[in-house]
Each structure stands twice: as C-alpha cells, then as structure tokens.
Image: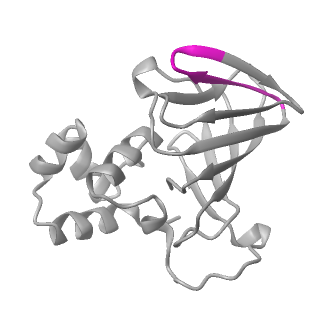
Amino acid sequence: MIDVGSKIRKLRKSKNLSIADLSAMTGLSTGLISQIERNKVVPTIVAMLKIVNALEVTMGYFFDEEKDMPTIIRKDERRVFATNDDSRIYEFLTPTHNKKMEFILIRLNNCTHKSEEAFSHVGEECGYVIKGSMAVIIGGKRYVLNEGDSIYFDSSIPHVYESNDDNECISIWAMTPPSW
C-alpha cells in the first residue's frame, strides 16, 4: 500500500498550512487529518478528494513514484487504493501522471454512502458494469446498473457509487480530466 499520510503532511507543510488550516479548507476534523497523516486511518474517498482539492493536486500525486510509467500496466503492478473495510477497492488501469484521461476498476462489496458523501469535480465519467449490480447516485437520483449496463454523466453533478445488493460488483470507469 502507498504511504499517503506522509505525502499529505509533506505537501501541506510545503504550502505552509497547519493541520487547522487544512481542516478549515476541507471540513474534516483536525484529529482525522492528524490520523491520516500518521497513517493511523485510511481516508475515505470523499476525504481524499477534499484533501486533494484543498492542496490543489490530483489523486495521482499520491500514487506517482515514477514520472515515466510504462504504457502497459500489468495486473500485478496496478496501483490500488482500498478503504479500511475493503468495501471499496480502486485499481488504477492507466498511469496517473500528466494524462488526459484515466481508467479505474472499482470493486464494491456492501458499500453504502450517506447523501453528503456525494462529490463533484470538473469533467465527465463513463462507467461499465462487468459483474454484479451497483447504484450510481447523481444529483440525488439513484440509477441502478446491472452487468453489461453503462452510464455516462457530467462529473460536476454531485455523485457517488454504492453496492446495490450483497454481492461483489466490478465496474470499469473512464474519467476526463483525471481526478485521481
């Protein structure tokens, strides 16, 4: 797994921000930011998106070890971001540095969200369900996607993904511009 916490701390300090400053910018508690920076907790996707927006970087900043990654990314070489409970696992299918689009494989297992976790960002997204069933909540409206279904939407509308049932769901998402 990637040491996200120390990268957040280093970037925060390089911008001369205190934990309290970052807390005010993100709406996250100072305690949570401190725990994330010390790698005591894995941040939720929503928390990470708030942090990257406040620090003016993309998620790719935290995953790029090499700037010249190969065009081919082997299955066992993918960068992976997982929640503490493994209800959401994100596998990056494209390089994350200075690209115009990104592809992500998302695995959902008993993943639910609160409406306030919906997030928006500049761009467009398109998703395709490979296995199982999922719900995509866009602008407060719930869309259920089953195996073989796809969806396209404007990412500036608040949205969130969640499981539709107790079975694992696997989907592939294209996003432009990259937000991770």
Q: In the figure, 137 relative to 66: above or below?
A: above
The answer to which image quadrant residue 162 occupies is top right
The number of callouts visible is 0
User: Which residue, as the protein is rendered here, is positioned at the far top?
Assistant: 141
- Residue under the point 54% across and 39% down: 85
- Residue under the point 37% across and 42% down: 47
The answer to which image quadrant residue 9 occupies is bottom left
Q: Report the coloring of the rendering.
A: one colour
Q: In the figure, 75 relative to 43: above or below?
A: below
Q: Nearer the viewer, residue 5 or 64?
A: 64
Is 139 contained in the magenta span?
yes
Asked if residue 124 lies left or right of residue 9, the reply is right
Asked if residue 120 lies left or right of residue 40, the reply is right
User: Which residue, as the protein is rendered here, is positioned at the far right?
Assistant: 148
Could you tell me residue 152's position as x and y percent?
A: 70, 34
Could you tell me residue 26's position as x and y percent?
A: 24, 41
Secondary structure mostly seen in magenta is strand
- Residue under the point 42% across and 49% down: 42
The answer to which image quadrant residue 132 occupies is top right
- Residue under the point 24% across and 48% down: 33
Could you tell me residue 102's position as x and y percent?
A: 63, 58
Could you tell me residue 153's position as x and y percent?
A: 63, 33
Residue interval drawn in magenta: 132-142
